[in-house]
Amino acid sequence: DAGITQSPRHKVTETGTPVTLRCHQTENHRYMYWYRQDPGHGLRLIHYSYGVKDTDKGEVSDGYSVSRSKTEDFLLTLESATSSQTSVYFCAIRTEGGTGELFFGEGSRLTVL
Amino acid sequence: GIQVEQSPPDLILQEGANSTLRCNFSDSVNNLQWFHQNPWGQLINLFYIPSGTKQNGRLSATTVATERYSLLYISSSQTTDSGVYFCAVLNTGGFKTIFGAGTRLFVKA
């Protein structure tokens, strides 16, 4: 257990509404990631963070923004949700030191109607 | 960017059979991991293996970094092995971990 909590775990919303997903970690890891998982596409990187207020884009960042004001929290925001953003969203942390392993949260299922 | 390809995309096994899953990557990597996504959607770490061979029970993995591939071996498969197996790599000098599309495994009782 890498101490990663995602919230909400399930959300249904309507097109055009803003949505924020939260990832909280308890072990002060520097690197945090947001992925989305869709059938036929595996896991694709949306955004990642390498420290407080340090973020960068991944493969599929359009329509998403992120913020990291504290080490423990990494927020993913959909400013105006679209049906194409219906997906399962996973947060991950990467340990440092010798291994640099990625560990995932439980996932957040988002449905945009 | 780095490309990660997994094969086969789908695999059906009879319980007790052995299998080999392959991961090819297009550039040098800092690390490589294998994950199992169970039918409930949880992503479980199997191996961190940038090079060499590791074993954990019925599972083992080998990465040949110079030839840019990794293999995951499952022996004496069980129905609980069903799910999707992902290979993921962190490219040299980068912060991003990139995933392959996965191998979907179904083990029949």
Image (cartoon, coloured by chain):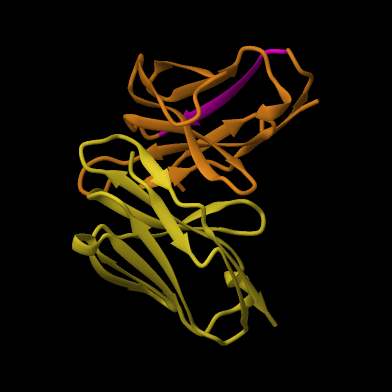
How far across and down, in percent of the image, does residue A76 sit?
Answer: 54, 22
Q: Quadrant of residue B87?
A: bottom left
How far across and down, in percent of the image, does residue A66 sit?
Answer: 48, 18
Q: Quadrant of residue B67?
A: bottom left
| Residue B95 magenta | no
Depth check, front residue: A70 or B9: B9
Q: Which image quadrant: the N terminus of chain B?
A: top left
Q: Residue at x 26, y 35 (%)?
A: B94
Display colour for chain A: orange
Depth check, front residue: B64 or B41: B64
Q: Residue at x 76, y 18 (%)?
A: A15
Depth check, front residue: B3 or A43: B3
How far across and down, in percent of the image, does residue A102 sit?
Answer: 38, 45
Q: In screen coordinates, is B55 left or right of B66?
A: right
Q: Which range of residues does the magenta coloring cover?
A: A17-26
Display colour for chain B: yellow
Q: Which image quadrant: the C terminus of chain B?
A: bottom right
Residue B108 vs A109, above or below: the answer is below
| Residue A25 magenta | yes
Residue A30 vs A77, above or below: the answer is below
Q: Residue at x 62, y 12 (%)?
A: A79
How far across and down, in percent of the image, does residue A33 sit?
Answer: 43, 32
Residue A2 vs B11, above or below: the answer is above
Depth check, front residue: A59 or B14: A59
